[in-house]
C-alpha cells in the first residue's frame, strides 16, 4: 500500500511538472519586438498591450512622448486609419537594448511619397516589456518631398474644405479620418485637372 502511494505521488508530481512546462513560454526581447510589429501589422492591439510597459516613451530627436497603454491605443487607432503594414527587416540584440530595422507602408506614406518608410529603432525593455522606442535613423526618407506634399495639401484643404482644417495636428481617430478624407479630396481634384 505504501509503495502504491509513493508511485501515485511520483506520477502526480511528474504530471504536474509536464503540465507546468507546457504553459506559455516567456518571449525573448527579440520575439517581443517581432510580435509587437506583427500585431501592429494585423491591427490587433490586444496582442500589443501585454508587450508594453505601463508607460511607453516614443523618442524622435529631442522630442519624447510618454503614453499609458490607453493613450497608446489612441495612437494605434490613429495609425490604423491609414491601413499600414509593418515588416521587421532586422533585429539585433545588444547588451541593454535592441536595434530593429522596420519597414512600414501606408496610404499616408504613399501620399507623402515615402512609401515604404524604413526606420531603425532603438528599443529598450524593462522587466520583459517594451519601455521605449527611439528613432535612430530614417533610411532613404525624402523629407523635402514629404514637406512639399504637405505644403500643397494643407493650404488647399484650408481654402476648399475648411471643415477638415486642423487635421494635420489632430492625433485622434477623427483627426486621422479627416487626414484620409483630405488626401482623397486632394487626389480627386488632381485627377480631374
Image (tube, rainbow, N blue to C red):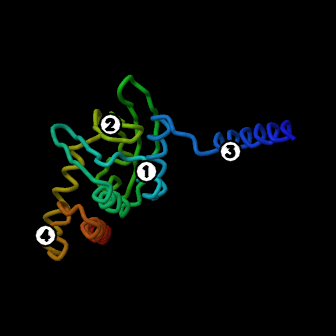
Q: Is residue 107 left or right of residue 13?
A: left
Q: Compare marks 1 and 4 and give the one earlier in the sequence.
A: 1
Mark 3 secondary-structure assignment: helix
Tag 1 near tag 4, CB within 8 Å: no
Quadrant of the image occupied by residue 187 = bottom left
Label 3: few (<14), some or many (≥20) within 10 Å? few
Tell me if residue 84 comes above or below residue 183 in the rendering: above
Q: Residue 68 at what x, y percent from top left?
A: 28, 53
Label 2: few (<14), some or many (≥20) within 10 Å? few
**Who's the residue at 36% across and 29% down the image?**
97
Label 1: few (<14), some or many (≥20) within 10 Å? some
Q: Is residue 38 left or right of residue 153?
A: right
Q: Which residue is mark 2?
A: 140
**Who's the residue at 49% across and 34% down the image?**
28
Q: Is residue 36 left or right of residue 145?
A: right
Q: Residue 122 at what x, y percent from top left?
A: 33, 33
Tag 4 near tag 3, CB within 8 Å: no
Q: Which residue is mark 4?
A: 158
Q: Which residue is mark 3?
A: 19
Label 4: few (<14), some or many (≥20) within 10 Å? some
Q: Nearer the viewer, residue 87 or 59?
A: 59
How far is mark 3 from mark 1, CA to CA?
Answer: 23 Å
Q: Compare marks 4 and 3 and give the one earlier in the sequence.
A: 3
How far is mark 1 from mark 4, CA to CA?
Answer: 40 Å
Is residue 161 something that shows in the picture?
Answer: yes
Tag 2 near tag 3, CB within 8 Å: no
Q: Compare marks 1 and 2 and give the one earlier in the sequence.
A: 1
Mark 4 secondary-structure assignment: helix
**Who's the residue at 38% across and 31% down the image?**
99
- Judge depth for marks 2 and 3 and give the one in front: 3
Q: Which residue is mark 1?
A: 50
Amino acid at each position: 500500500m505504501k509503495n502504491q502511494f509513493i508511485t501515485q505521488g511520483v506520477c502526480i508530481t511528474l504530471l504536474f511538472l509536464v503540465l507546468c512546462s507546457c504553459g506559455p513560454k516567456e518571449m525573448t526581447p527579440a520575439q517581443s519586438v517581432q510580435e509587437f510589429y506583427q500585431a501592429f501589422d494585423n491591427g490587433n492591439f490586444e496582442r500589443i498591450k501585454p508587450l508594453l510597459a505601463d508607460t511607453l516613451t516614443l523618442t524622435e530627436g529631442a522630442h519624447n512622448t510618454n503614453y499609458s497603454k490607453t493613450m497608446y491605443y489612441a495612437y494605434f487607432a490613429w495609425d490604423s486609419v491609414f491601413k499600414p503594414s509593418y515588416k521587421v527587416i532586422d533585429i539585433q540584440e545588444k547588451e541593454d537594448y535592441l536595434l530593429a530595422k522596420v519597414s512600414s507602408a501606408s496610404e499616408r506614406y504613399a501620399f507623402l511619397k515615402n512609401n515604404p518608410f524604413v526606420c531603425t529603432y532603438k528599443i529598450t525593455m524593462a522587466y520583459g516589456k517594451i519601455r521605449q522606442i527611439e528613432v535612430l535613423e530614417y533610411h532613404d526618407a525624402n523629407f523635402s518631398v514629404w514637406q512639399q506634399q504637405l505644403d500643397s495639401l494643407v493650404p488647399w484643404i484650408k481654402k476648399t474644405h475648411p471643415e477638415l482644417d486642423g487635421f494635420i495636428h489632430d492625433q485622434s481617430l477623427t483627426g486621422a479620418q479627416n487626414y484620409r478624407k483630405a488626401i482623397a479630396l486632394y487626389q480627386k481634384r488632381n485627377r480631374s485637372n
